[in-house]
Image (tube, helix red, strand yellow):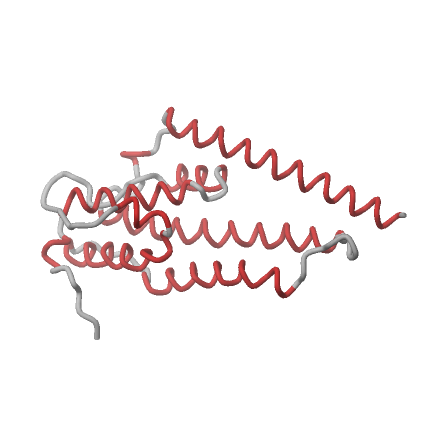
Amino acid sequence: MTTNPIPAASEAPQSATPMFYVVSINKLIALLLVTSNLYAFYWFYRNWSAYRQATGEALVPLLRSIIPVLFMYPLLSRVERGLNATGRRFDWSPLMLTLVMWLVIVASLVSPWLSPEPSELTPPKLSHWGRLLFETFLYFAITTWLFCRVQRAINTHEGDLQGQANSQITWANWIWIAVGVLMWTLYVAVMTVSMSVSFLWGLS
């Protein structure tokens, strides 16, 4: 049985100041997918920043958002304690979601070793690109589901189930979207050229 370093009473909202970052699920999904999950770093930063402002806990949001997975469970456990303190209920497991995120990261690091990258001596085959596309899809599907589960818990904690307080696309969001579209355009272009080269190589 673990002990909480922060008293449960301090987790309860003391004012109208949000303790965590509220955002609608649709907006979160759009920004995560368009930005290739880069928005997640900002999402972690906003959550830690809101928590520090609401509770006064001595922490540095920027440091906790640089390598966010290291501080994922501490964040989720604070959300859970806050839910318990407010009496609001949400069916989830902070530990399970954290383990899923770590599993995804480990799998993405191990995958290249299980299937070596092509070289000049072993040109890429279409099956290689098919595997890469499948892994990319699986990665985004799992991480998007994970962030949505956490966000639903946060919105429940803040009493804004639909995230209406932050459901509109702002000018800052459009900057994220523009950067994301550029990244995806470059990614699709590189993939298209690489697959075409692989196909032509196979015909030669």
Q: In this view, does 123 lie to the left or right of 94?
A: right
Residue at the bottom extreme of this rendering: 1
The quadrant in which residue 91 appears is bottom left
- Seen at 19% across and 54% down, the residue is 82
Q: Is 59 situated above or below 3? A: above
The quadrant in which residue 28 appears is top left
Q: In this figure, what is the number of numbered marks? A: 0
Q: Which one is in front, 141 or 50? A: 50
Q: Is 53 situated above or below 83? A: above
Residue at the front extreme of this rendering: 120
Q: Where is residue 3 in the image (x, y as percent from the top left)?
A: 17, 69
Q: Where is residue 125 in the image (x, y as percent from the top left)?
A: 76, 53
Q: Is 77 situated above or below 19? A: below
Q: Where is residue 187 in the image (x, y as percent from the top left)?
A: 61, 39
- Seen at 72% across and 43% down, the residue is 194
Q: Which one is in front, 150 or 114? A: 114
- Seen at 41% across and 39% down, the residue is 26
Q: Where is residue 27 in the image (x, y as percent from the top left)?
A: 40, 37
Q: Is residue 168 left or right of residue 160?
A: right
- Seen at 43% across and 61% down, the residue is 102
For the N terminus, give its image quadrant: bottom left
Q: In this view, does 17 lie to the left or right of 131?
A: left
